[in-house]
């Protein structure tokens, strides 16, 4: 496909773009129709082919032998990438290396393990957070007061971070993902960068390795800190980066879906009532929430050989940008994609978790958290409505609803 005549780079380079969902999706819809594989060229940023359609994203995800993850798997400016230290998390790995690192924690995130070890705790935690909503007196900011903290508590407890440190980790993860958000950036130095935010988070988590090597427990950090790679102890930097990706990916994405799911239910009161009357619908409703919110905005891959896709020749060395929000609104896959439909027959075809070798390791955990919380809330709430304007997070990495005032009984 040829490059569209006007500049569409704002869709992928500006944190504010994803905060204006109507404008972003209108532009994405036109690209899917007119130029579903479009070259994005802008000074100071790597040139990428933006992949807008579901089928094409899936094709590239399946061809992990050709399209590799790299240190620049996040789409960032050249300046931001140059300033960042080289990253060695599982999202920057491929092949045997990726398989070896991923396997360290796979057992913790299997369906059976999570249901055996976590379901009761999730149910109890859901009850405690709905209790907090009751104690708030019938009004709260659902995202700031509930959705930010519920998944954070879950993932950091699994990781082994003490509860009194959870607020600090929340602040640090928001710095990583929210460096372009005016609200969060206001408290930071003018020259603060993504690299600075990442280093702060890594610095905070570095003490976990020493602590878990000295006194192993039954948490994920202990598994990582005491693991071996190719017969040698895992490196300190690799261990810390592993903690960081679990803490960030396991929190901010689920929080964004909780906020987006609640917003969708408030806009569709009939769906909310149906879920109250028939909780068995919750499983499919959560899949629709994931499709709807699509919290992870894009990852890039680099081609290792020439590859033709939809008539476009992607050359060896070229980068592609996989647009998950666009793929999850693809009309060819999801009829009437801009309708939130808890009965959607193929809602589970969303790719909010990616696909293939890099499919999100915490996907089932996120699903369980969402089902547990919304089942508890909707079994107890009598009336619920919006109580103010919705605000969205400014970020090109993970974004969603930032503030969602609600009123309820």
Image (spheres, rainbow, N blue to C red):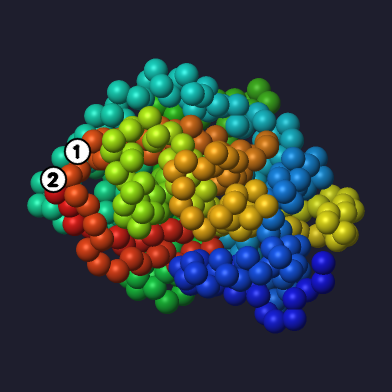
Alpha-carbon span between mark 2 and mark 1: 10 Å
Which residue carries the number 1 mark?
380
Judged left or right of residue 209, residue 235 is right
Mark 2 and 1 residues: CB-CB less than 8 Å, in contact? yes
Crowding around mark 1 (Cα neighbors within 10 Å: few <14, some 14 to 19, many 20+) is some
x and y, in percent, of residue 212 in the image: 41, 29
Which residue carries the number 2 mark?
134
Up the image or down, 87 lies above or below 75; here it is above
Q: Nearer the viewer, residue 15 or 54?
A: 54
Q: Residue, x 33% and y 32% (percent of image)?
A: 279
Q: Is residue 162 visible to the viewer in this orientation of the structure?
A: no
Quarter of the picture holding the N terminus: bottom right
Q: Nearer the viewer, mark 2 or mark 1?
A: 1
Q: Residue, x 68% and y 37% (percent of image)?
A: 356
Crowding around mark 2 (Cα neighbors within 10 Å: few <14, some 14 to 19, many 20+) is some
Which numbered tag is attached to residue 150? none
Q: Residue, x 22% and y 63% (percent of image)?
A: 387
Disc 2, SS: helix
x and y, in percent, of residue 81 in the image: 62, 63
Q: Residue furthest bottom?
A: 6
Disc 1, SS: helix
Q: Would you identify the image quadrant in which residue 228 lies?
A: top right
Tell me which numbered mark, 2 or 1, is placed earlier along the sequence: 2
Q: Is residue 312 visible to the viewer in this orientation of the structure?
A: yes
Judged left or right of residue 149, residue 344 is right
Up the image or down, 166 lies above or below 224; here it is below
Q: Residue, x 81% and y 52% (percent of image)?
A: 303
Up the image or down, 125 lies above or below 54; here it is above
x and y, in percent, of residue 114 in the image: 43, 24
């Amino acid at each position: 496909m040829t490059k569209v005549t006007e500049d569409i780079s704002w869709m992928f380079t500006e944190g504010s773009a994803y905060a204006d969902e109507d404008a972003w999706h209108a532009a994405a819809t036109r690209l899917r129709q007119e130029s579903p594989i479009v070259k994005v060229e802008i000074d100071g940023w790597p040139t990428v082919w933006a992949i807008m359609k579901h089928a094409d994203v899936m094709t590239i995800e399946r061809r992990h032998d050709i399209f590799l993850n790299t240190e620049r798997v996040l789409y960032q400016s050249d300046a931001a990438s140059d300033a960042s230290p080289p990253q060695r998390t599982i999202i920057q790995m491929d092949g045997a290396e990726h398989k070896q690192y991923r396997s360290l924690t796979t057992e913790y995130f299997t369906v059976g393990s999570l249901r055996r070890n976590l379901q009761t705790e999730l149910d109890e935690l859901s009850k405690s957070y709905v209790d907090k909503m009751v104690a708030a007196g019938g009004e709260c900011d659902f995202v700031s007061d509930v959705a930010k903290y519920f998944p954070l508590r879950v993932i950091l407890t699994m990781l082994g971070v003490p509860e009194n440190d959870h607020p600090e980790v929340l602040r640090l993860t928001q710095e990583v993902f929210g460096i372009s958000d005016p609200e969060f950036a206001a408290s930071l130095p003018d020259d603060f960068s993504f690299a600075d935010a990442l280093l702060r988070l890594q610095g905070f988590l570095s003490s976990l390795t020493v602590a878990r090597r000295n006194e192993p427990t039954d948490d994920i950090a202990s598994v990582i800190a005491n693991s071996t790679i190719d017969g040698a102890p895992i490196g300190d930097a690799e261990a810390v980066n592993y903690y960081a990706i679990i803490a960030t990916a396991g929190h901010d994405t689920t929080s964004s879906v909780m906020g987006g799911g609640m917003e969708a239910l408030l806009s569709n009161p009939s769906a909310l009532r149906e879920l109250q009357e028939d909780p068995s619908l919750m499983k499919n409703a959560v899949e629709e929430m994931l499709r709807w919110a699509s919290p992870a905005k894009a990852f890039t891959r680099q081609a290792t050989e020439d590859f033709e896709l939809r008539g476009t020749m992607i050359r060896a060395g070229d980068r592609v940008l996989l647009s998950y929000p666009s793929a999850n609104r693809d009309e060819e896959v999801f009829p009437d994609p801009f309708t939130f439909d808890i009965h959607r027959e193929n809602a589970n075809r969303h790719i909010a978790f990616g696909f293939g070798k890099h499919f999100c390791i915490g996907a089932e955990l996120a699903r369980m958290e969402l089902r547990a919380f919304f089942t508890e809330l909707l079994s107890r709430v009598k009336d619920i409505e919006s109580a103010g304007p919705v605000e969205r997070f400014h970020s090109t990495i993970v974004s969603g609803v930032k503030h969602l005032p609600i009123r309820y009984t």
